[in-house]
Image (spheres, grey):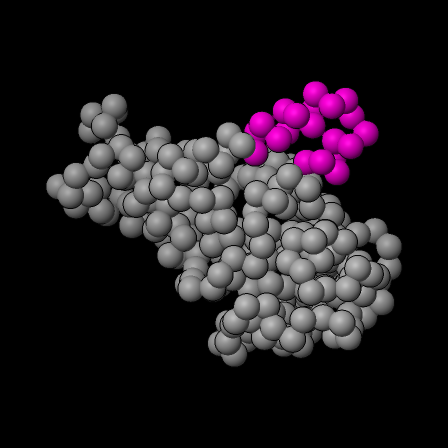
Amino acid sequence: MDKQNSPYPACLAALLLCSLPQFPAWGGDSKSEPPAKKGWPKQLDTRKLYPSKCGFVYAAGDSAAAQVNKLIEAAVKESQQNGVKEPKAGLVLVVDRDDKPPFSVEQLMIKLAQKQNQQKEGQEQQKALESIADGKKKFEELGLDMNMLLSITPMPIEPNMLPDLVGGFPADLAGQIGWCVAIPTEDNIRHGFKTLLDAGMKKEKVGMAKRVAMAPLLAIAEHKAIGELKKGRQDALCLLLAGKQIDFTGKQKQDKEQEHKP
């Protein structure tokens, strides 16, 4: 295959964008009280509030809520096997295929960048903001926006940031939950991955004939990638339940996950 016409660089570049944001999202270090519904929105767009084994879930339907509750139960069990005696209670915002994004990914990244660099020189914060702008531009070049990340990867949110990002939550939310995360459904992961792949193909102007020729290899790569993305949701929940820092950069994430293995 002609290397210059190969779609792999663009597809890989699109998937590497999943590593954004490169700023950690904290679940909180203080012990939280069990979550309470008082003062919480009854709905977030089409999402209703459901109870879960370890807090609450906002989902647009019973099926999506049940799927994520099953995921939470598996994460709680795994966390307990790894020595977490009292998993922290939290909140999950479910992102299904046709759901409106619950918040702006760009806004979340900016808030995290500002917090992480607030004690550093202004130049460092500016570099972080430029990195976010560069990531946004790359998505736009693929005909997508940064909220696409919500379709393929968990996005942890500091509880004290959620009221500003979403609205309708009490200002003292961080005292009610220890962590918060947006999680895509399995259907959304499949759809999001294929959308990214297709965008990469179009950017590289890959014709139908080449797509057909590459189909077997792409099917294998797609199956593996989607499997890893699905597994990443439980890994993220385990880290949050343990009250540990989570990030999305490759090696750092592996190092953090290694800490929770028995």
Task: Name the spot of residue 119 as percent of width and height, x first.
Answer: 81, 29
Answer left or right for 142 relative to 88: left
Name which residue lies at 62% across and 31% down: 129
Is 57 included in the stretch rendered in magenta? no
Query: In the shown orientation, is residue 218 left or right of residue 167?
Result: left
Name the residue rendered at 86%, 59% in the picture. Answer: 31
Residue in the foreground of this view, choosing between 111 and 90: 111
The quarter in which the N terminus is drawn is top left
Give above or below for 30 relative to 33: above
Q: Position of residue 74 (x, y in %)?
A: 61, 67
Q: Nearer the viewer, residue 139 or 67?
A: 139
Foreground pick, 45 / 159: 45
Name above or below for residue 42 compared with residue 181.
below
In the rendered image, residue 207, in percent from the top left (x then y), is placed at 17, 39
- In the image, residue 99 above or below residue 221: below
For the record, the magenta segment spans 113-132
Residue under the point 69% across and 65% down: 168
Q: Position of residue 53 (x, y in %)?
A: 69, 74
Q: Quadrant of residue 247?
A: top right
